[in-house]
């Protein structure tokens, strides 16, 4: 069984792949998908955080994209970009850590749930697949370990493919001994030692394949030399190289980058510029590699920001936010109801937007309509699907 697993299933030509991109810290939706046609936006956002109407990339009479998202506009025109308005959950938690736990676990009980939503999805969708590469996180952890952890699938976390592997040896001789002990075909005693050896063998095989594909990849599009660019380039290489992974997770190297409490504009502007360039290169590259039809990329962020600007030229923790989807499989445009910006309709604390779509509906839709995994056993109940 171990040797069969090590032979390693390759990705089928039409095997669908999900990429989850985490915007850690709480992305400001109103500065990403700008409601420039709403008078309240101009009243809430002063010069420090308001995106000037003359610079907005207008999509209709109400909404437009941040001026640094020109690539997203091109993707929308090509029919491979969609946005879901007002995604959140009841009784929102305004702590980064608790809200992140809720999104990672796919459950408002947070870490009281033993396994993450991606791990549970793999357990339900691929119960007999022993390959550890079914789900892979590339780049920072930032909660990915929680989301990926399942009863049968733990997930692989790769910070950099070139350095991924066993790091316990202090000398070359120790490393060589470790490899010899844990190579396919090694004879071990039955029981716990055999299980440990099997785990080491499969981990080594996974590390070797990920290192090889990461090092040998030749993209057809130049990626920006940025955290998002490097991580998405790695994922494109693993997809194109035929890795059997069905779900990838990535983000930006660091922590809480989108937590823009003060002096928001320069920081958020730069983040969106970096995100736009990396995402556009990723999708263009996949298309030229003949892989785009297989891939759906979905963003998530633990919450949105306040509708009203604070006194430090920034915004604070709030609730509902737009989430974005990219790939030829999406129905382009906007989905769901945009939250009202009227003062009476904001949350009583923090001037946050009320949610209209539960984040578990997004998860359920992606699982069922893209990966073909039944969502009810993953999420504990049937959630309405999004069109």
Image: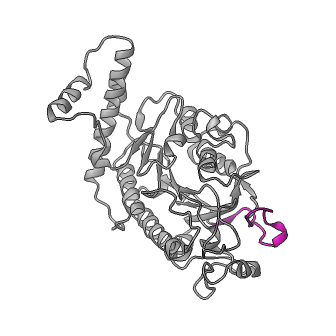
Is 113 on the left or on the right of 276, as rendered?
Answer: right
Position of residue 208 measured from the top left corner of the image (x, y, whole percent): 28, 39
Majority secondary structure of the magenta segment?
loop
For the record, the magenta segment spans: 333-352
Displayed quadrant of residue 33? bottom right
Work out which residue is located at the far bottom of the displayed protein and give it: 54
**380 up-or-down from 15: above or below:** above
Question: What residue sits 60% from the left and 88% below the top?
Answer: 54
* Depth check, front residue: 204 or 305: 305
Coordinates of residue 187 in the picture (x, y in percent): 26, 15
Furthest residue toward top: 190
Residue 53, percent across and down? 63, 86
> Which image quadrant is residue 379 in?
top right
Q: Is residue 209 magenta?
A: no
Instruction: List x then y, in percent, for residue 30.
Output: 65, 71
Name the residue: 68% across, 78% down. 45
Way the structure is coloured? one colour
Please state which of residues 83 and 13 is positioned toward the viewer in this rendering. Answer: 83
Which residue lies at the image location 74% right of the left edge and 48% below the top edge? 384
């Amino acid at each position: 069984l171990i040797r069969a697993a090590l032979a390693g299933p390759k990705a089928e030509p039409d095997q669908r792949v999900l990429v989850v991109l985490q915007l850690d810290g709480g992305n400001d939706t109103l500065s990403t998908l700008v409601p420039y046609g709403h008078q309240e936006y101009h009243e809430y956002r002063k010069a420090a955080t308001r995106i000037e109407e003359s610079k907005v990339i207008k999509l209709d009479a109400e909404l437009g994209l941040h001026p640094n998202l020109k690539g997203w506009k091109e993707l929308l025109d090509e029919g491979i970009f969609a946005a879901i308005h007002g995604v959140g959950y009841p009784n929102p938690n305004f702590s980064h850590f608790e809200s992140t736990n809720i999104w990672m676990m796919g459950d408002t009980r947070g870490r009281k749930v033993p396994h993450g939503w991606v791990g549970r999805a793999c357990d339900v969708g691929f119960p007999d697949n022993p390959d550890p590469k079914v789900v892979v996180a590339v780049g920072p952890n930032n909660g990915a370990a929680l989301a990926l952890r399942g009863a049968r699938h733990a997930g692989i976390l790769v910070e950099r493919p070139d350095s991924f592997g066993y790091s316990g040896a202090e000398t070359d001789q120790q490393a060589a001994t470790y490899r010899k002990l844990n190579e396919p075909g090694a004879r071990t005693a039955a029981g716990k030692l055999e299980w440990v050896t099997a785990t080491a063998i499969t981990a080594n095989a996974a590390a070797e394949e990920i290192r090889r594909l990461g090092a040998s990849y030749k993209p057809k599009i130049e990626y920006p030399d940025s955290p998002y660019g490097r991580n998405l380039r790695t994922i494109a290489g693993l997809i194109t190289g035929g890795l059997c992974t069905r779900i990838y997770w990535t983000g930006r190297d660091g922590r809480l980058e989108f937590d823009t409490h003060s002096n928001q504009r320069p920081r958020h502007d730069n983040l969106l510029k970096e995100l736009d360039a990396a995402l556009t290169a990723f999708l263009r590259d996949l298309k030229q590699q003949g892989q785009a039809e297989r891939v759906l990329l979905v963003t998530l962020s633990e919450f949105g920001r306040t509708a009203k600007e604070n006194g430090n030229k920034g915004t604070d923790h709030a609730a509902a936010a737009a989430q974005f989807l990219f790939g030829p499989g999406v129905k382009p445009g906007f989905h769901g109801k945009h939250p009202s910006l009227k003062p009476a309709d904001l949350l009583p604390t923090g001037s946050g937007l009320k949610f209209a779509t539960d984040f578990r509906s997004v998860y359920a839709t992606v699982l069922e309509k893209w990966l073909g995994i039944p969502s009810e056993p993953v999420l504990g109940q049937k959630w309405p699907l999004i069109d």
